Amino acid sequence: MSRFDFTPYRRSTVGFDRLFDLLENQARLNAGDNYPPFNISRRGEDNYRITVAVAGFRSQDIDITAQQNLLVVQGKKREEIEDGSELLHVGIANRGFERRFELADFVRVERADLADGLLIIDLVREIPDAMKPRKIAIGGSATLTAVPSGDSEDAASAA
């Protein structure tokens, strides 16, 4: 396992300890088991999708728990129904799993669906109005106006 050394970054930054710890812990935890496989895609500026391959699992076999900055997907192994047949080869994994996804601030689960052996979890980032950039008028006016999301760089360069 290769390990990335964050020491030079830790020396020159303040308040990023949680981020560096998170990256180091993820590298350590994800070094082993890659089951079940998954994809993470960005579907827009504030929309994401996690797709987990869960062949053989039903919706009642899967638990999705979202808490602050953490999404946990668990699959519970179920007992096979005996139909009198004898398995000659077992290639479809039927084992329990737990996948953890660290979420950024203000990211929440919008919906989850299970179809064709794929668990699809849609996520959306909703930044509160109080955290969005605001334009501050110079002069005697105390009126603040919200800056549209695409204009934050333009407003910064104009100042």
Image (cartoon, rainbow, N blue to C red):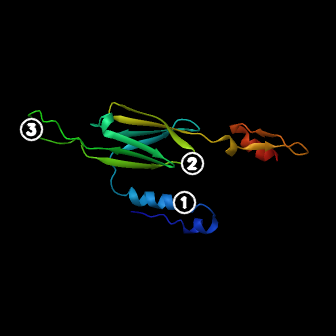
Residue type at tag 2: Asp
Q: Seen from this angle, which residue lies furthest top?
A: 115
Q: Residues within 10 Å of mark 1 (few under 14, many from 20)?
A: few
Q: Distance of mark 1 from mark 3, alpha carbons?
A: 51 Å
Q: Are the residues tagged 3 and 2 within 8 Å (C-beta)? A: no
Residue type at tag 3: Glu
At numbered mark 3, what does the secondary structure look like: helix, strand or loop?
loop
Q: In this view, does 115 lie above or below 159?
A: above
Relative image position of residue 70 (x, y in whole percent):
47, 49
Viewer-nearest residue: 62 or 152: 62
Q: For this view, does 115 lie left or right of residue 86?
A: right
Residue labelled with disc 3: 86
At numbered mark 2, what does the secondary structure look like: helix, strand or loop?
loop
Q: For this view, does 5 lie left or right of residue 89?
A: right
Q: Quadrant of residue 80?
A: top left
Q: Going from the N terminus, do you reach mark 1 or mark 2 first?
A: 1
Q: Seen from this angle, which residue lies furthest right?
A: 140
Relative image position of residue 52 (x, y in whole percent):
38, 40
Split into 4 quadrants, where in the image is the N terminus?
Answer: bottom left
Q: Going from the N terminus, do you reach mark 3 or mark 2 first?
A: 3
Residue 54 appears in view: no
Q: Distance of mark 3 from mark 2, alpha carbons?
A: 50 Å
Q: How crowded is mark 3: few (under 14 residues within 10 Å), some or many (20 or more)?
A: few
Residue labelled with disc 2: 105
Residue 1 appears in view: yes
In the image, what residue occupies the spot 54% across and 43% down?
Answer: 107
In the image, what residue occupies the spot 17% across and 42% down?
Answer: 90
Relative image position of residue 69 (x, y in whole percent):
51, 49
Residue type at tag 1: Arg
Residue labelled with disc 1: 18
In the image, what residue occupies the spot 42% across and 42% down?
Answer: 39
